[in-house]
């Protein structure tokens, strides 16, 4: 073997071992298993954090996370990509309001809905506002979960900036928000409709019996195996003909093999067992 090739292999091995030590440290500190995320993409993201604090290796950065709670919080915020806004992809929320939710309401006047990876709460509050308009008398269960306690705290406070509310109509702004300068606070009435909980999608158990699950722009860095396992668990959590609403950058590979059929882009319906078997 050429000496240069040997040095490259040794360097790759050292880098892989360094990242593996870091991965185990992160799991111990946060419960987040980076092994379920695409390794190269996640390492590239985290290296920008190493550069920011001047850590020469992943192991050094892991030691910093262990002794600095504020840096650990910044790390979790960064890798969880806590970015959301009200009515993100407005055309798809129009479809949700005009077609998906009315169809589900024809089956049951009281819906059970889960926003998985809810971030700052803008997504589930968007659904709550829609239901307040089209089915105000229903006793709806609205569950929102996230792995990040900071994101949940922000969601519970219900305070947002101009970028977050740019897609909210004037009518809904007047009905559901108060504003002071560039700060917008959603009404306590809408906030009271939602239950927020800590939840790790890759490790914790799932509730069942949902009519609609939203998991949007959450799984972008998951491995294909982790994605397929997650979508399979979402299927088990949905009622027959329940709907999974995913993000614009995502798709479910071999959806029918795990019991889903696409109804339009972003929306997948859980096939009943008989129909699933026939599709195969």
Image: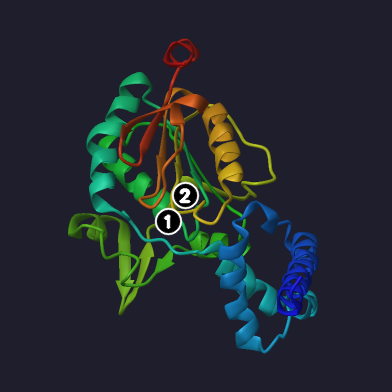
- What element does badge 1 sit on? helix
Count of residue discs: 2
Q: Position of residue 211 (x, y in %)?
A: 44, 29
Gap between marks 1 and 2 measured at Cα: 6 Å
Q: Residue furthest front?
A: 1
Quadrant of the drawing holding the N terminus:
bottom right
Say if 97 sits above or below 110 in the image.
below
Say if 66 sits above or below 27 in the image.
below
Residue at the image position 60 percent from the left and 37 percent from the top: 229
Say if 268 sits above or below 79 in the image.
above
Residue at the image position 48 percent from the left and 61 percent from the top: 120
Residue at the image position 54 percent from the left and 57 percent from the top: 221
Q: Is residue 11 left or right of residue 148?
A: right
Q: Position of residue 148 (x, y in %)?
A: 61, 61
Q: Is residue 181 left or right of residue 64?
A: left
Residue sitting nearer the eye, 150 or 45 = 45
Q: Quadrant of residue 56?
A: bottom right
Residue sitting nearer the eye, 229 or 88 = 229
Q: Residue furthest left?
A: 170
Q: Is residue 216 visible?
A: yes
Task: Check whether the beta carbons of the residues at disc 1 and disc 2 lie within 8 A of each other.
Answer: yes
- What element does badge 2 sit on? loop
Residue 188's label in the rendered image is: 1
According to the image, label 2 marks what residue? Answer: 192
Graded by Cα atoms within 10 Å as few (under 14), some (14 to 19) or many (20 or more), the crowding at tag 2 reads: few
Q: Is residue 259 visible?
A: no
Residue 142's label in the rendered image is: none
Q: Quadrant of residue 39?
A: bottom right
Residue at the image position 49 percent from the left and 12 percent from the top: 277
Q: Is residue 224 left or right of residue 178?
A: right
Q: Position of residue 210 (x, y in %)?
A: 49, 30
Q: Position of residue 77 (x, y in %)?
A: 57, 68
């Amino acid at each position: 073997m050429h000496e240069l090739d040997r040095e490259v292999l040794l360097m790759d091995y050292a880098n892989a071992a360094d990242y593996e030590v870091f991965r185990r440290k992160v799991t111990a500190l946060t419960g987040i298993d980076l092994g379920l995320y695409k390794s190269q993409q996640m390492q590239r993201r985290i290296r920008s954090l190493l550069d920011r604090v001047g850590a020469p290796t992943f192991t050094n950065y892991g030691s910093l996370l262990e002794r600095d709670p504020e840096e650990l919080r910044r790390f979790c915020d960064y890798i969880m990509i806590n970015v959301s806004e009200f009515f993100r992809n407005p055309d798809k929320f129009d479809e949700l309001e005009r077609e998906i939710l009315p169809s589900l309401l024809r089956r049951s006047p009281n819906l059970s809905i889960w926003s998985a990876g809810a971030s700052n709460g803008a997504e589930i509050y968007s659904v709550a506002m829609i239901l307040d308009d089209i089915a105000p008398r229903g006793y709806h269960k609205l569950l929102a979960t996230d792995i990040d306690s900071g994101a949940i705290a922000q969601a519970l406070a219900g305070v947002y900036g101009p970028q977050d509310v740019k897609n909210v109509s004037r009518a809904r702004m007047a009905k559901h928000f108060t504003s002071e300068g560039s700060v917008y606070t959603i009404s306590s009435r809408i906030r009271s409709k939602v239950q927020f909980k800590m939840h790790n999608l890759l490790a914790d158990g799932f509730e069942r019996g949902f009519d609609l699950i939203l998991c949007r722009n959450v799984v972008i860095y998951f491995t294909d195996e982790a994605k397929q396992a997650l979508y399979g668990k979402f299927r088990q959590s949905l009622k027959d003909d329940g709907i999974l609403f995913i993000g614009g950058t995502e798709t479910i590979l071999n959806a029918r093999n795990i019991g889903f059929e696409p109804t339009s882009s972003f929306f997948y319906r859980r096939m009943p067992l008989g129909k699933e078997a026939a599709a195969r």
